[in-house]
Image (tube, rainbow, N blue to C red):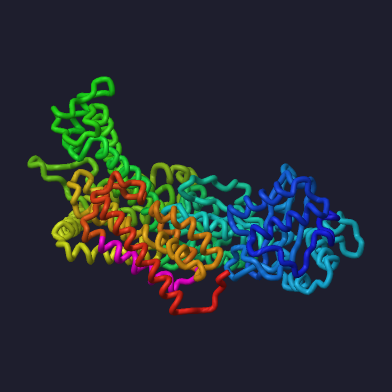
């Protein structure tokens, strides 16, 4: 790499364009003019494609666009000191020092090696100062070559210089949020960027909705420390037993990834630093120790249960809604008969079954509607047990899952236990699942930490702990928990059913405020969990059931924050940075899909003006939804589940009004309450 960069590849105090696209294309042309590119356009397109996946701007006025490309035949680095500066997506403003790193396609990870060396140097003030002060391209090129391809000290051969290398350090991380949609991957990107900047290898395991690729055990073994950026329990946490750890929520990773990486490196060198506790042999880990507070631990445990519950609710709710779309609401009275008496080759007669709203009045639609309804009801049967099971899992790892599921199953009387008069056993619902899951997890964790003989240790996680815990917690649920909490659930249901219009509007305002306040955090998830528990019990109720109206208010209120901010970036572009305007484009789809996290980049950059604005918009939307009697049977999907909505006009009207109110509020606050900020 002796000619990785030459003076011909350097531009000082250059105006290369008004945005990062123009700058990257200009740097690609510089590479071509220096005779280092075989296809300038391809180089530019590949660099821009990489830039579109995540911004390469770093704090301190630095940007490192990079790519593998067929546009070059050898590793090449072009550098520009910009005047004026240009936004590359860094939180602290525009970039002055821009490096374009390009490596031949198929040339292994050369450009990543260069990135690592550059990142390590960029945290040294003397290096960036040398580039800002360089008077000639030759001086700038020499300064860069000194860090990416340093000469051996004193002329000693490279082999001698490497004879006694420092002990290599590396990190591993796990990121996870309750829904696994946005925060999980945003936190991973932030940590990876921070590690590159610090010059430390980092491998992240994202435990999100797109699936998980577990970390290689050898990578974990070699890691100096582990970072947990999670709002839920870490799956198979015992893999990391004994490692120095930094543990926090995903929000810290997004906002302060540099600090988390630095803290992890400090902990790696500190024998007294917090460590992941647990035992791989028993398959359990102390999921709540390390450096968590009781509040953080409680939040994580509950959010883990909610995280694993949501897929059951989403699948079940959408399947039930599809069943109603195809077979009509009357399918609830005929699905049993259809499933027993009919097949795909012996279709039912809708009229003889009293089905008056079957799609196309078709026997096939009635049959498919019955199947979808049964599938949805089956998924719903499991969502309360999943809540209990994975709360226990968050506390005790795998040994807690079975007893937690048992506790959750008993909380909803999953087998329909009833007396001779047909009166069912009391069901404590999601409240019982929370209590039972916590008790099961605590007991399973206590048993896992008992000292046992070697011959018994292997049986503990697969037999002894699940058996003893299920027996004890099952008895406690039946004899102690279900009756009082069942009475509480009955009173809550009666209160919801007896609400007048005025009370319902107030409820809509309250859940609207909760949905917008922390955009996917605890308050948001509390409101969402209450709503989905309601539609779980209302699967066979009329379309005007208050549970369905509450679900509509929650979904509409959760869509408003990103939609309102996206609208504001269109109406008053000058009030937002280039990065915020780019985020606004994505926020349209995120909001329409009921992903409230689309508002997070705006709130993180300007919380005092953004959060009150979106709370106002969501409160208006939630109250208006209740006032208009909007209902929805699907627990997720946004505008893509209109077939499951009662009063579609009211649904869309509430979304539009809420988004306009949020946009107007944020524009007003940014206009009237000014503060110094870039508006490029």
Total label count?
0
The residue segment tinted magenta is: 605-624
Up-down relation of residue 337 to residue 602 (above or below):
above
Up-down relation of residue 419 to residue 116 (above or below):
above
| Residue at 45% over, 74% down | 670
**In front here: 541 or 562?**
562
Q: Assess whether residue 616 is covered by the magenta stretch.
A: yes
**Whole-percent x and y of residue 185?**
52, 54
Observer able to see residue 622: yes
Prevailing secondary structure class for the magenta stretch in the rendered image: helix
**Whole-percent x and y of residue 12?**
77, 68
Q: Assess whether residue 518 is covered by the magenta stretch.
A: no
Q: In the displayed image of the protein, which residue is found farthest to the top?
A: 345
| Residue at 30% over, 36% down | 375
**In front here: 427 or 39?**
39
**In front here: 440 or 5?**
5
**Whole-percent x and y of residue 221?**
62, 51
**Whole-percent x and y of residue 288?**
44, 61
| Residue at 60% over, 46% down | 216
Observer able to see residue 395: no
Q: Quadrant of the C terminus?
A: bottom right
86 left or right of 604 in image: right
């Amino acid at each position: 790499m002796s000619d990785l960069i030459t003076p011909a590849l350097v531009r000082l105090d250059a105006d290369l364009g008004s945005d990062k696209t123009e700058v990257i294309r200009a740097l690609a042309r510089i590479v071509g003019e220096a005779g280092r590119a075989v296809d300038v356009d391809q180089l530019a397109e590949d660099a821009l494609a990489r830039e579109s996946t995540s911004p390469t701007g770093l704090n301190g006025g630095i940007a490192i666009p990079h790519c593998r490309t067929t546009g070059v035949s050898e590793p090449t680095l072009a550098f520009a000191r910009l005047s004026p500066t240009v936004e590359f997506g860094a939180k602290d403003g525009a970039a002055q020092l821009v490096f374009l790193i390009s490596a031949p396609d198929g040339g292994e990870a050369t450009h990543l090696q260069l990135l690592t060396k550059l990142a390590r140097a960029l945290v040294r003030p003397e290096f960036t100062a040398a580039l800002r002060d360089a008077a000639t391209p030759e001086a700038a090129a020499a300064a860069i070559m000194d860090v990416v391809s340093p000469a051996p000290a004193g002329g000693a051969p490279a082999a001698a210089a490497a004879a006694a290398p420092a002990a290599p350090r590396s990190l591993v991380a796990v990121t996870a949020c309750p829904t696994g949609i946005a925060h999980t991957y945003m936190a991973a990107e932030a940590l990876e960027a921070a590690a590159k900047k610090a010059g430390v290898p980092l491998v992240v395991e994202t435990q999100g909705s797109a699936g998980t690729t577990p970390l290689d055990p050898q990578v974990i073994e070699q890691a100096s420390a582990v970072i947990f950026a999670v709002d839920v329990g870490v799956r198979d946490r015992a893999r990391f037993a004994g490692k120095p750890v930094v543990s926090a929520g995903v929000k810290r990773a997004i906002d302060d990834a540099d600090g988390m990486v630095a803290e992890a490196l400090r902990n790696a060198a500190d024998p007294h630093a917090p460590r992941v506790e647990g035992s791989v042999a028993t398959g359990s880990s102390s999921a709540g120790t390390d450096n968590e507070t009781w509040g953080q631990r409680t939040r994580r445990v509950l959010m883990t249960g909610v995280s694993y519950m949501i897929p059951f609710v989403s699948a079940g709710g959408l399947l039930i809604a599809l069943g109603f779309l195809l077979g009509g609401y009357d399918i609830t009275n005929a699905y049993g008969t259809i499933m027993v008496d009919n097949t795909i080759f012996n279709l039912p007669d809708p009229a003889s079954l009293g089905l008056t709203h079957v799609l196309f009045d078709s026997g096939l639609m009635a049959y498919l509607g019955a199947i979808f309804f049964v599938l949805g009801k089956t998924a719903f049967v499991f969502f309360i047990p999943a809540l209990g099971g994975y709360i226990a899992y968050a506390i005790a790892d795998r040994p807690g899952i079975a007893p937690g599921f048992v506790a959750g199953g008993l909380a909803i009387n999953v087998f329909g236990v009833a007396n001779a008069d047909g009166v069912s056993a009391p069901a404590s619902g999601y409240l019982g699942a929370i209590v039972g899951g916590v008790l099961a997890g605590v007991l399973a964790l206590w048993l896992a930490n008992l000292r046992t003989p070697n011959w018994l240790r292997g049986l503990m996680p697969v037999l002894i702990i699940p058996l003893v815990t299920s027996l004890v917690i099952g008895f406690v649920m039946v004899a102690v928990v279900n009756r009082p909490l069942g009475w509480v659930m009955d009173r809550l249901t009666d209160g919801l059913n007896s609400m007048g219009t005025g009370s319902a509007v107030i409820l809509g305002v309250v859940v609207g405020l909760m949905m917008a306040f922390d955009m996917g955090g605890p308050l948001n998830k509390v409101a969402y969990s209450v709503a989905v528990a309601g539609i779980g019990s209302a699967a066979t109720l009329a379309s005007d059931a208050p549970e369905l109206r509450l679900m509509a208010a929650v979904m509409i209120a959760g869509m408003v924050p990103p939609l309102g901010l996206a609208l504001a970036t269109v109406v008053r572009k000058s009030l937002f940075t280039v990065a915020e305007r780019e985020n606004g484009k994505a926020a349209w789809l995120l909001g329409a899909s009921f992903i409230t996290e689309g508002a997070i980049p705006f709130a993180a950059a300007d919380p005092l003006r953004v959060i009150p604005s979106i709370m106002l918009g969501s409160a208006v939307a939630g109250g208006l939804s209740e006032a208009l009697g909007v209902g929805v049977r699907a627990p997720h999907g946004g505008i893509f589940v209109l077939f499951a909505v009662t009063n579609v006009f009211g649904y869309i009207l509430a979304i539009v009004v809420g988004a306009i109110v949020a946009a107007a509020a944020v524009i007003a606050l940014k206009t009237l309450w000014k503060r110094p900020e870039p508006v490029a």
